[in-house]
Every structure is written in C-alpha cells, then in structure tokens.
Amino acid sequence: MTSTSPTTALTATPRPRPAGRRRRPLAALLGLVVLLAGYTAWTQARPVRLTAAVEIEATPEEVWQVLTDFAAYPEWNPFMTSAEVTSKGGRLEKGARMRNVLHSGTGDTTFTPEILAAEPDRELRWLGRMGPGWIADGEHRFLIERTGPGRVRLTQSEEFTGVAVPFFAGQLKSDTLPQFRAMNQALAQRAGELSR
C-alpha cells in the first residue's frame, strides 16, 4: 500500500504595507499641486508690464479715428498689420471678439482677444489668451489723454500674466516693446496728417 501524504501548497501572503508607505505618493502629488498653485499665484501677482507713450499733435477724436480704422492698418501700422472685429456685427464694443495679426522679426502671430473696453476718444482695451488663462494672458490697452489744445498723449501698454510669462519676459521687453514704440510713432504721424 502506498501512502500518500497531503501536499501543502505554499502561498505567499502579501504583507500589508506600512501606512506611511501608502501615503508617500499621495503626499508627493499633493506637494506638487501645492507647488504649482503657489507658482501660478506668484506669476499672477508679478505681471510683466510694457508701456510706450507718445505725444501727438492731434485731437483725441483724430487719434481714435486712426486707432480704430482697422481696415487702414496695412497702410501704416508696422506692428499690428491686420485687425478686425469678428463678432457683435463688427461693432467695436465690450465683449466683442477681434482677430489681430502682429508682425515681428520672427514672423506673424494671430490673436483673437476679447474687447474689455471701447470708450471713443479715450480707451481701447482687450484681453488675449494663450491657452487657458493661467498659461499666458495679455491685457492690451491704448489710452488717449488730452494734454493741451490739439495735443494728446497716447499710451500703449500691456500687462502679461501666467505661468509661461517669466520664461519669455526678456523677449517681450527686447522684441515687443520696440514694436509698441514703432506703432505709436506711425500712429502719431498718421494722426498728424489728418489734423492738418
């Protein structure tokens, strides 16, 4: 007679991981989220601002006329070579969308900002976005201020915010600011011709 012995199956029972090990990936992820949120808040609180102003021998009405005659931009504007209001029946008003083509040494860039303010003879302001708002926003503003009879100051400015902005702040200052100045000078010349 043959005897058989029962076979014992050895199974490895996983040992439970200590609670601290299970929490490490979660803590790392939470730390990364907090770090990114802090960086995003820091970039929003520290915008890059560009400002260029020019004195113009013209009235606020004449400067506004040149600034908002988008169809004529290709004739005189070295920076914003094309602009048009693409919504709200083409009316220049708050909430309308625009399509702007900006020219620089590296080529043309198209933006589709939303108009935030369009106060005739005084202010035109829009907000352009690159991706979601936390990537890069640019709030562009033209302010017309009367400085005397037949004389105004045109200030063109932009405030850039977002997590990508610190990485190209130097380029904005070295490339974009001279473009603002060139546009201001060309606009001053064009408005001066109208006032004669």
Image: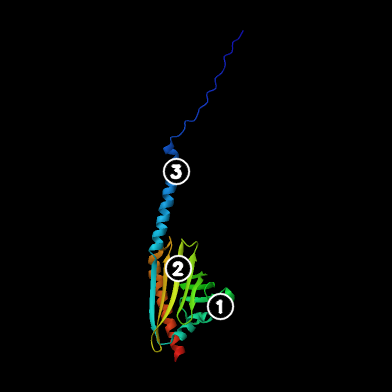
Q: From the viewer's perspective, is residue 133 above or below residue 23?
A: below
Query: Label 1 vs label 3: CA separation?
Result: 53 Å
Residue type, numbered disc 1 = Arg
Give x and y (percent) for residue 52.
38, 76
Q: From the viewer's perspective, is residue 75 above or below residue 176?
A: below
Q: Which of marks 1 and 3 is nearer the N terminus?
A: 3
Mark 2 — residue? 138
Front-lying residue, 88 or 135: 88
Q: Earlier in the sequence, mark 2 or mark 3?
A: 3
Horizontally, residue 34 falls left or right of residue 92, namely left
Residue type, numbered disc 2 = Gly
Q: Earlier in the sequence, mark 1 or mark 2?
A: 1
What is the residue that sits farthest to the top in this orientation?
1
Whether residues under marks 1 and 2 lie with C-beta atoms below 8 angstroms apart, the answer is: no
Query: Label 2 vs label 3: CA separation?
Result: 36 Å
Q: In which quarter of the image is the C terminus?
A: bottom left
Mark 3 — residue? 25
Query: What label does residue 49 carry, if any?
Result: none
Give x and y (percent) for residue 33.
44, 51
Residue type, numbered disc 3 = Pro
Task: Please identify the quarter of the rendering in which residue 19 is found.
Answer: top left
